[in-house]
Amino acid sequence: MADTTVKVDSETRDRFAAVAAARGQSVRAYLAELAIEEENQIKLSKATAVFREIIAQPGLAEAFDAAFPDDAPARRNTAGRAA
C-alpha cells in the first residue's frame, strides 16, 4: 500500500501522537485502527436501525415467542395493577 500525506494542524497532529503513544502505537497504526473502528460503528448503527425497524413490526415478538417457547421470557402477572 502506498503512503500518502494528510495535512492536519499541529495541535491535531500532537493529539493523535499523544493518544497513539499512550496506546503504545505509532500514529500510522493508531489512525488505521481508528478508521476500522469508525467503519464498524457506521455499520453497527445501520444494523441497529434495521433491527429496531424489524422488531417494531406488530406481532413479531409474539411470533418469536411462539416459535421458540423455551426461550420466551416469563409472562408478568399484571392483574390488579392500576392502569
Image (tube, rainbow, N blue to C red):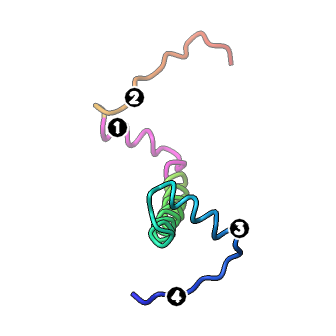
Residue 43: in magenta span: no
- Give the SS element for disc 4: loop
Rendered position, 63 above or below 48: above
Q: Nearer the viewer, mark 2 or mark 3?
A: 3
C-alpha separation, residue under disc 4 versus residue under disc 3: 20 Å
Task: Say which residue label 4 marks.
Answer: 4
In the foreground, 8 or 18 = 18
- Give the SS element for disc 2: loop
Q: Amino acid at mark 1?
A: Ala
Q: Amino acid at mark 4?
A: Thr
Residue 7, x across and y down, in percent: 65, 82
C-alpha separation, residue under disc 1 versus residue under disc 4: 56 Å
Mark 4 vs mark 3: which is more N-terminal?
4
Residue 56: in magenta span: yes
The reply to whether callout 1 and callout 4 are in contact (CB within 8 Å) is: no
Quadrant that contains the C terminus: top right
C-alpha separation, residue under disc 2 versus residue under disc 1: 11 Å
- Give the SS element for disc 1: helix
Task: Say which residue label 1 marks.
Answer: 66
Q: Amino acid at mark 3?
A: Glu
Q: Nearer the viewer, mark 4 or mark 3?
A: 3
**Residues in magenta, as a range:** 54-68
- In screen coordinates, is 33 left or right of 83? left
Task: Say which residue label 2 marks.
Answer: 73
C-alpha separation, residue under disc 2 versus residue under disc 4: 54 Å
Residue 40, x across and y down, in percent: 47, 63
Task: Say which residue label 3 marks.
Answer: 11
- Give the SS element for disc 3: helix
Mark 3 vs mark 1: which is more N-terminal?
3
